[in-house]
Amino acid sequence: MDQGNQLFALALGLVPPWVVDEVRFTLEEKRLDLHVNLLKGSRFPCPVCGQDCPVYDTQEKVWCHLDFFQHAAYLDARVPLVRCPEHGVHLVSAPWAQEGSGFTLLFEALVMAMVREMPVFTVSRLVRETDQRLWRVLDHYVAKARKAVGMSDVHSVGVDETSGRRGHDYITLFVDLEAKRLLFATPGKDAKTFEQFSEDLQAHGGSAKAITEVSMDLSPAFQKGAAEHLPNAQVTFDRFHLLKLVNEAVDAVRKGEVLSQPDLKKSRWLRLKNLGKLSAKQSARLQEILKNQNLKTAQAYPLRLTFQEIFTVRNRHQDTTLLTAWVENAKDSGLPPMVKVVYILMNHWDGVLRWFESQDTRRILEGFNSPIPSAKAKARARGNSTHNNFINMTYLILGKLDLRIPT
């Protein structure tokens, strides 16, 4: 064997009967082709039974490989067909690529590493391939890794929905709150998503009856789904969604008087942001608004601050006392949006109070919201932000999958 060919064979990790018998470089196309051949008299195991069989014929195939310096590199190979006395003629799998792929395993490993960090469309331009082909690579590895996921030890889950695309188009996420990983994602935000999760859980060795804790928002559909498909789970309504209700009530109060109170215009975000995140100018303007005791908004906003503060206390008995007092104050305020929140809380009192028993775990669910915009951005490209693409990206980022990618 030519010494240069042998060097490339070693670099590719090829062992007999595979050899590199030709290296071609086309300057005009800036392309390197490595031709892989078989040693004469080679035998290969039958893909069905493993019996050693002679080569019956070969097929020429091409795979995109990692760049050679700045030049595109390809593997061209004569892939053998073997004739098994029992199972007939079969094509042998090339050891450097998955069956049916036009990329080598190392090329796919590079792609999978890159799509964790940047949008798939950006990666496609860097590697000179279409984004559709790269999505198929990602889909293959995510699906394969998810099949190997075990869920027998799952007992505590968090449920949340996020918009998959613009408009009312949602994805529901089921999170293992103990292992801090995404378990399951599916389109929709109705009770059926719990049925689908239960089936997926069972398919991975878990059991819906083994779920003893579920954290979620106040969605009637979620409550129905949990009651029907997670029969042994105690429900916690997490603080993130409870505070969202209070924020919406404060903003509803503001909207009700903004026409008669010009000072309230363009002040919505002042009341939604935490005080510590306001600039000096924003804080000064907020304080000026709150000084006006004739404003209903100035009455509603302190209720919002107090409500948020209650959820930082660690003593459950004190939490319950403070929340009960808050409910009475909010009811006495006479502000319809705040009174509406009071009745919502009272109708879900056990699930609201349960947050104080497991608040450390519930923060995990809130933390899962942070990487979601990144997953959306990576999935979004030239109209390719499908449910499947977005879900695969969330699995890749949040699923802690063992992709078993070659290095």
Image (cartoon, rainbow, N blue to C red):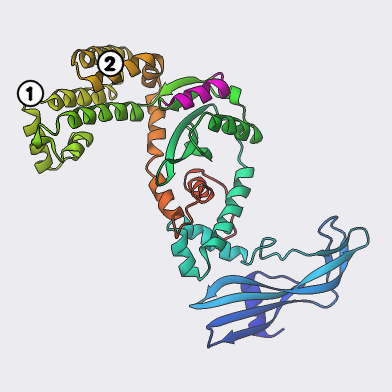
Residue 168's spot in the image, x, y percent? 42, 40
Q: Would residue 333 be found to the left or right of residue 196 on screen?
A: left
Question: For the residues carrying marks 1 and 2, which lies nearer the camera in this image?
Answer: 1
- Residue visible at 85% across and 71% down in the picture: 55
Is residue 332 in sight in this rendering? Answer: yes
**Of the pair 4 and 110, the residue shown nearer to us:** 110
Residue highlighted by disc 1 = 294
Q: Is residue 83 above or below residue 196?
A: below
Give the Cα separation between the discs numbered 1 and 2: 26 Å
Which three-letter amino acid code belongs to the residue tagged 1? Answer: Asn
Disc 2 on helix, strand or loop? helix
Residue 208's spot in the image, x, y percent? 59, 26
Q: Is residue 105 above or below residue 175?
A: below
**Of the pair 100 and 396, the residue shown nearer to us:** 100
Of the numbered discs in the image, which one, if any, rests on residue 218?
A: none
Q: Is residue 230 magenta?
A: yes
- Residue visible at 57% across and 33% down in the picture: 197
- Residue visible at 61% across and 48% down in the picture: 143
Which of the image's four quarters has the N terminus?
bottom right
**Of the pair 207 and 53, the residue shown nearer to us:** 207
**CB under 8 Å between callouts 1 and 2?**
no
Q: Is residue 20 magenta?
A: no
| The magenta segment | 219-232
Question: Quarter-wise, where is residue 361 in the image?
Answer: top left
Q: Earlier in the sequence, mark 1 or mark 2?
A: 1
- Residue visible at 16% across and 40% down in the picture: 278
Q: What secondary structure do most residues of the magenta stretch adopt?
A: helix
Residue highlighted by disc 2 = 323
